[in-house]
Image (cartoon, rainbow, N blue to C red):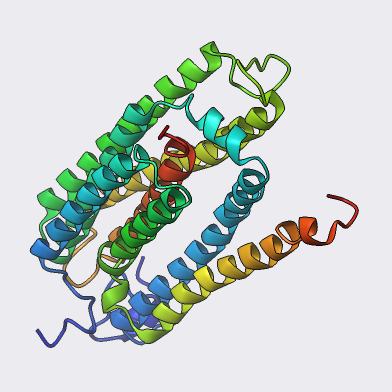
Amino acid sequence: MAEAGIHGHTVPLRVYFGVFGALMVLTAVTVAVAFMDLGPWNTIVAMGIAVTKATLVILFFMHVRYSDRLTRIVVAAGFFWFAILVVLTLSDFLSRPWLGVPGR
Amino acid sequence: MHSPAVAERPHGHPALAHHFESLAQQKQASSLGMWVFLVTEILFFGGAFLAYIVYRSAYPEAFAGASHHLDVTLGAINTAVLIVSSLTMALAVHAAQTGRRRGTIGFLLATMVLGAAFLVIKAVEYGHKFEDGLLPGPHFSYPGGGARQAELFFSIYFAMTGLHALHMIVGLGLLATLVWLAARGRFSPGYNTPVEMIGLYWHFVDIVWIFLFPLLYLIGRHG
């Protein structure tokens, strides 16, 4: 279809159902893993699964996989700015006990 | 409805605004604008997620203990309900793109039913928390130690799930508008931008819950 790139891409239904299946499986996995004791890995695995699920939704349900480059940059910039917010804030909160500064 | 600028175009689509060259350009602008809005939403929820990160890193044991008071089963059911609603939303977009009006309306209504089901389950959960005295405030009562820190957890829980539920309610209103527009035959394979844009919003709200569920319900479940 020559029009596909212009009037929006129609994503094949099997892609939608495939992503849906993966999201349901990952939900079951994250619940199961939460009841195992993995120490600090519990949080890392839970967040890894959540990021994977969110990426699947963004790429396929939200069509970013099929979007133009400008849209992709805007999406990436949003998460990058959120990362700045978290990293800079934690660089303060997590480093306070290292130096024994007041305000702790 | 037909502005002079549109009337001058021999092949102007009724949905094409006069300041766009083509429906394709108009759709690109809509999509970019919707994503810019969603980026502001990322940072809006981001502030709340940051509060969670800071206080959980400060009081990890109290947060894990407080998390035990949430109902994992209801939380997991709601996660599944939202994922199914994202699927029906994606199918509604697909139906609009392929010109199936009844399919579009059907999948939009299914998405609304699932969204409403999520809110009902959420309301039941809130009710249980109120009965248990876990609503932060003067009547907050918490068994065991670390009550002040647990109150922080529940403040964040109610603020974040409340903001999320508010977005769901707005989404239901938007979906109802889409059903009305679809029933009036406003969408076609050539023009279905509103369905796609509201779809983006609905999926975004699903993503927020994808993170809220493990962060609020699933911490410290082992041992």
Residue B113: horizontal and vertical position, in percent?
Answer: 26, 35
Figure check: B27 above or below B88: below
Image quadrant of residue B77? top left
Residue B194 appearing in the image:
no
Report the front residue among B29 and A84: A84
Report the front residue among B62 and B84: B62
Q: Is residue B6 left or right of residue A89?
A: left
Residue B167: horizontal and vertical position, in percent?
Answer: 47, 44
Residue at 47% across, 27% down: B68
Figure check: A103 above or below B59: below
Residue at 47% across, 17% down: B127
Residue B84 appearing in the image:
yes
Residue at 16% across, 52% down: A21
Residue at 41% across, 46% down: B209
Residue B115: horizontal and vertical position, in percent?
Answer: 32, 38
Q: Is residue A7 left or right of residue B175?
A: left
Image quadrant of residue B193? bottom left
Report the front residue among B55 and B80: B55
